[in-house]
């Protein structure tokens, strides 16, 4: 059954980033994900993974920029990827190459390439989206060739435009159509149930629809709307996690479920760990149901 990865960009905010690896391992996680690794030496990250018996299962390619300083500046300036942005092809390629170097050193099997935000800048909206789509597919063709040559995958993620206004990739169907258009086994969809619920809802049906296709490479979870623990908010994760287990078992889906949420008390000492009751309950139910 799918296993859970701690998102170190959001969880364990009470300790410095490099100490979060140990904190996650202490809570029983065997894998981690996070937004960006580029502010830290890759050897230091690899040592933290190895020292705590953790796998790196996902991180993002740069949202813009080509080195640690410019990547931080791009994120602070609300750049959210360059994959679909005409004229930013060189930046996109440099970012993917940097991400793949980190992925190789960290033995991480997949990277997420954020699509980017559309800026109309006087263009007709339909023209802009057509140009963005063409640029996106072209860039992804190139990226998956680079990734596949190293045995890695590229992920694309639909993200809600309440959190990221103007973000190009919004819906699950749009992402799956792009994966099919590119036509490579090295390109998968990152299915974040938080974003899916905000944009389109009907989450359980979409899990049953898309997991068996083989086009989903990773799942992420968070409560809606505050993005806290999964047991806080409008989504019934007790049910949804059972759906994931059921469908994954039926179709042999081998992916990870990333805990990309901000714990309600995450800035307090031990706050993330105290909020993991939802996970302990789910794993206990699994043990009860396993023959």
Image: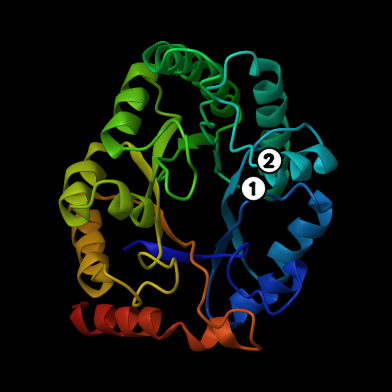
Q: Residue at x 39, y 78 (%)?
A: 279
Q: Is residue 150 left or right of residue 169?
A: right
Q: Is residue 281 left or right of residue 114?
A: left
* Residue 214 visible in this rendered orientation of the protein: no
Q: Residue at x 58, y 71 (%)?
A: 11
Q: Quickly name the residue at label 2.
A: 104
Q: Is residue 217 left or right of residue 209?
A: right
Q: Residue at x 47, y 34 (%)?
A: 166
Q: Position of residue 160 (x, y in %)?
A: 40, 46
| Image-quadrant location for residue 88 | top right
Q: 173 and 32: which one is in front?
A: 173
Q: 91 and 124: which one is in front?
A: 124
Q: Quickly name the residue at label 1.
A: 107
Q: Position of residue 232 (x, y in %)?
A: 35, 77
Q: Is residue 275 left or right of residue 171?
A: right
Residue 233's disc is none
* Residue 284 visible in this rendered orientation of the protein: yes
């Amino acid at each position: 059954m799918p296993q859970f990865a701690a998102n170190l960009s959001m969880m364990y905010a009470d300790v410095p980033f490099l100490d979060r690896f140990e904190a996650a391992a202490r809570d029983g996680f065997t894998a981690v994900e996070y937004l960006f690794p580029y502010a830290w030496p890759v050897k230091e990250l690899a040592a933290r993974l190895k020292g705590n018996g953790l796998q790196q299962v996902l991180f993002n390619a740069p949202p813009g920029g080509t080195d640690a300083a410019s990547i931080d500046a791009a994120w602070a300036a609300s750049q959210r990827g360059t994959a679909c942005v005409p004229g930013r092809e060189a930046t996109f390629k440099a970012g993917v190459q940097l991400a793949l170097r980190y992925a190789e050193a960290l033995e991480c099997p997949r990277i997420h390439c954020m699509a980017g935000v559309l800026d109309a800048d006087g263009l007709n909206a339909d023209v802009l989206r057509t140009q963005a789509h063409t640029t996106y597919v072209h860039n992804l063709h190139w990226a998956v060739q680079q990734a596949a040559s190293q045995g890695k995958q590229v992920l694309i993620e639909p993200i809600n435009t309440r959190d990221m206004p103007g973000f190009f990739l919004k819906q699950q169907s749009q992402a799956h159509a792009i994966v099919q258009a590119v036509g490579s086994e090295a390109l998968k969809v990152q299915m974040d149930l938080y974003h899916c619920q905000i944009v389109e809802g009907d989450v359980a049906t979409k899990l049953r629809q898309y997991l068996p296709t083989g086009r989903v490479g990773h799942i992420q979870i968070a409560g809606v709307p505050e993005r806290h623990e999964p047991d806080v908010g409008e989504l019934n994760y007790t049910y949804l996690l059972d759906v994931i287990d059921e469908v994954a078992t039926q179709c042999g889906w081998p992916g990870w479920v990333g805990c990309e949420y901000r714990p309600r008390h995450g800035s307090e000492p031990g706050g993330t760990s105290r909020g993991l009751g939802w996970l302990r309950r789910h794993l206990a139910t699994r043990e009860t149901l396993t023959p």
